[in-house]
Image: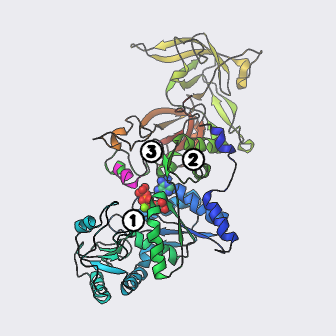
Amino acid sequence: MEETNIVNEKPSLNFLEEIIENDLNNGIHKSIITRFPPEPNGYLHIGHAKSICLNFGLGKKYNGRTNLRFDDTNPVKEDVEYVDSIKEDIKWLGFNWAEEHYASDYFEQLYLWACELIKKGLAYVDDQTQDEIKLNRGTVQTPGKNSPYRDRTPEENLRIFQEMRDGKYADGEKILRAKIDMAHTNMHMRDPILYRILHTEHHRTGNKWCIYPMYDYAHGQSDSIENITHSICTLEFDVHRPLYDWFIQQLGIFPSHQYEFARLNLSYTVMSKRKLLQLVQEGHVSSWDDPRMPTICGFRRRGYTPEAIRNFCDSIGVAKRDNFIDVGRLEFSLREDLNKRANRVMAVLDPIKLVIDNYPEGQTEELEAINNPEDENAGTRKLTFSNTLYIERDDFMENPPKKYFRLSLGNEVRLRYAYFITCTSVEKDSQGNITTIHCTYDAASRGGNSPDGRKVKGTIHWVDANNHINAEVRLFDRLFISETPEKTEDGKTFLDNINPDSMKILKNCKCEPSLKNVKHLDKFQFERLGYFSVDYDSKEGAVVFNRACTLKDSWKKD
Ligand code: ATP
Ligand code: MG
């Protein structure tokens, strides 16, 4: 994929914008209300970010509003920890919700509406077991069978439903179903379940309820209560839409409409919350915010900016058919953003000592360095220089191949912002490893400028060994080796596609002293090495950096 296409894409309306403009122009709605409806059963991932940018973006673009609604109808897997993290992540992405709601706040209203459906003969209590219900649903080819309890009178249904609420029955003993059509071509319309009994404490309603509404019953009605005009969800819900509409019609309530778009899938990434939870629980990653995780908090910790994520979400558009997006596009977005805002600094990840034999021992001088060539307001800083430096081990080769323009015996290179140096000799330990590189410098090349038009092909970065800080640096690679980690052969799982080398920890890195007082999540470009962000593990005197991304896409196929 040509990266430049992303930037130059002509803005045209996506299909949701077309629908909304049509609704507004034709007076179907005066203004729009959208919502983002997470289930608080995990941390948000980049797919959710797409949905957030879409819903909040549409609300903003059309001067409408966007609500945050927690779809908290399943007390078994939900938790306040997730509620808090979801709110933090949405705010961090840069969005503010108009109203904060919880489906659980609507439990009483949903219960009353269920009673209304019962009274209208449109819902009944079924005593069949889960297995019987499943069996009697039939298949796509064959119609289902009516439940023997289908013709209970509204009075009897009301009484038992009340008893279900009062806790008279055990989990699974009875359920409430809509009475629609057991032969319907859409399986979701074959008397779908509205309520099940669950004697489980809910993170908000405590032990007030022991019956809980199903997603399909709760979702549309919650939209309707909030006057949501455009209820946007992912494609797999299109088969649920007839049911969504059926409830609203039968109850005669505000007609919210559901629209579906293709969920975001990223290469080399898994996105299901269940699988992400498994990665955390089984210790394949350290936490939900492990910098290798595709969670919003993981990206944040890795060094992503909200702008990079938002630009990515906007650039990929809104699809109507499922597709895979190259994870390289997300990295491209980050690089583009950090290039503008991250100050350049020098750091050496794999240091080797370099001594300049003709530079006076004990002398030190200050050299000027540009903070960010992309931002003229970023200014300059002073670097100290002395006779002992660190350079990157792989910037020197004893037996260089042709076209190796970095340092080698007898070869001259430029030290960034400093001087031209020429390598004269190396020192080795008893095993033959190089321990020190000896050079001479040309005092006339101060600032890295050629004194006499003499050209050097290589410029390398360095850190003053007499004035530096030590740091730990964590390098990341993709968490999965497969482009589609969930596609596996028989007997294998996505876990078999984990990249065993997805993290490398370097403990002996040397950085220029300007990095001494950094704060968590401060971001820098380490010259020639990539973009780095200060990790939460960083403490005063023990700085830890995460590499957010390299300077170029190292995975790109030429
Ligand atoms: P998962 O499949 O990861 O468990 P989910 O759909 O169950 O996700 P919810 O909390 O119900 O998670 O999702 C909240 C909203 O985010 C829903 O509207 C859902 O459609 C949307 N969403 C979830 N995953 C994606 C995705 N990959 N791309 C776009 N939108 C998504
Ligand atoms: Mg869901």
- Apparent side of residue 434 relative to residue 159 in the rendered image (left or right): right
In space, the residues marked 1 and 2 are separated at their CA atoms by 56 Å
Q: Give the label, 3 or 1, closer to the camera.
A: 1
Which of disc 2 and disc 1 is earlier in sequence?
Answer: 1
| Rendered image: mark on residue 522 | 2
Amino acid type shown at disc 3 = Thr
| Rendered image: mark on residue 269 | 3
Within-10-Å neighbours for mark 1: few <14, some 14–19, many 20+: some
Q: Is residue 141 visible in the rendered structure shown here?
A: yes
Q: Are marks 2 and 3 in contact (CB under 8 Å)?
A: no
In space, the residues marked 3 and 1 are separated at their CA atoms by 35 Å
Which of disc 3 and disc 2 is earlier in sequence?
Answer: 3
Q: Observer-nearest residue: 556 or 450?
A: 556
Q: Give the label, 1 or 2, closer to the camera.
A: 1
Q: Give the label, 2 or 3, closer to the camera.
A: 3
**For the magenta stretch, what is the residue range?**
267-278
Identify residue for label 1.
Answer: 185
Name the image quarter holding residue 131: bottom left
Amino acid type shown at disc 2 = Asp
Name the image quarter holding residue 153: bottom left
The picture places residue 136, in percent across and down from the top left corner, at: 26, 67
Is 67 within the magenta? no
Is residue 365 positioned above or below 51 on the image? above
Give the residue displayed 42% in from the left and 73% down from the top: 218
| Rendered image: mark on residue 354 | none
